[in-house]
Image: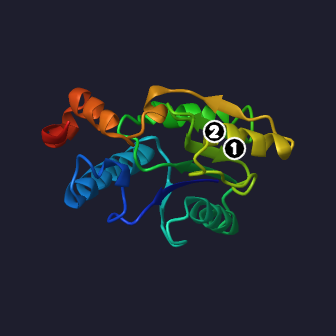
Amino acid sequence: MLTAVVPVKSMELAKGRLATVLDPAGRRALAEQMLKHVLGTLREAGLGTVRMARGEAGGDLNADAAAAARQAQTDGATDLLLVTADLPYLSAADIVAMIDAGRTSPVVIAEAKDGGTNALLLRPPTAIGFAFATNQPSASLHADLARSAGIEPVIVRRPGLARDIDTPADLAALVADHPAYQVFRHVA
């Protein structure tokens, strides 16, 4: 059984790196819109069990992801698909690509444009630890964790999984090419 988990920061803390171009209300609105898109895309891809992992560990994404993985495994999940909440280009085909790659390896890493990790497919859910938000390219760190566990990971590079929204330039590009985000054009 596959369980999808979307880690979610407190909306008041979301998208802090955009503080130079968006006020708190704008950052919250952007984060909520992207989260809604990601959750809808997971459901569109046919995933029956989709959960949000609220920031229970004081904003520590690694601790939140680990807790969500343990809970999913306790609840009977054999596979965990962890997807970040800031992927406005995500499509159902991207989710299918992650699941298909999981037939090749029990660890699948979706690499972000900056070398970070925007999604992980793990079988079992606790197959490896988490290495998000380390000020290093977490995709390579997750790959190293997999290899240390004796697993050769699959790296998935797809635009819908790679293009997260972290910087003012990311937001400007999003506003320019995604009609659903035109409401933020005044800041781009």
Mark 1 belongs to which amino acid?
Answer: His
Q: Who is closer to the viewer here, 95 or 180?
A: 180
Residue carrying label 2: 139
| Residue at 64% over, 53% down | 1
Q: Position of residue 142 (x, y in %)?
A: 69, 43
| Residue at 29% over, 38% down | 171
The answer to whether the residue labelled 2 contacts the one labelled 1, judged by CB atoms less than 8 Å apart, is: yes
Q: Who is closer to the viewer here, 148 or 126?
A: 148
Quarter of image, res 121: top right
| Residue at 32% over, 53% down | 31
| Residue at 23% over, 46% down | 21
Q: CA distance from mark 2 to mark 1?
A: 5 Å
In the visual, does 151 lie left or right of 56?
right
Mark 2 belongs to which amino acid?
Answer: Ala
Q: Who is closer to the viewer here, 44 or 15?
A: 15
Q: Is residue 48 visible?
A: yes
Q: Position of residue 16 (x, y in %)?
A: 36, 55
At numbered mark 2, what does the secondary structure look like: helix, strand or loop?
helix
Specify the farthest residue to the front: 20
Q: Is residue 15 visible?
A: no
Quarter of image, res 175: top left
Quarter of image, res 143: top right
For label 1, the crowd category at 10 Å Cα-Cα, with few meaning under 14, some 14 to 19 and many 20 or more, is: many
Q: Position of residue 149 (x, y in %)?
A: 84, 47
Residue carrying label 1: 142
In the visual, does 33 lie left or right of 147?
left
User: Image quadrant for the C terminus?
Assistant: top left
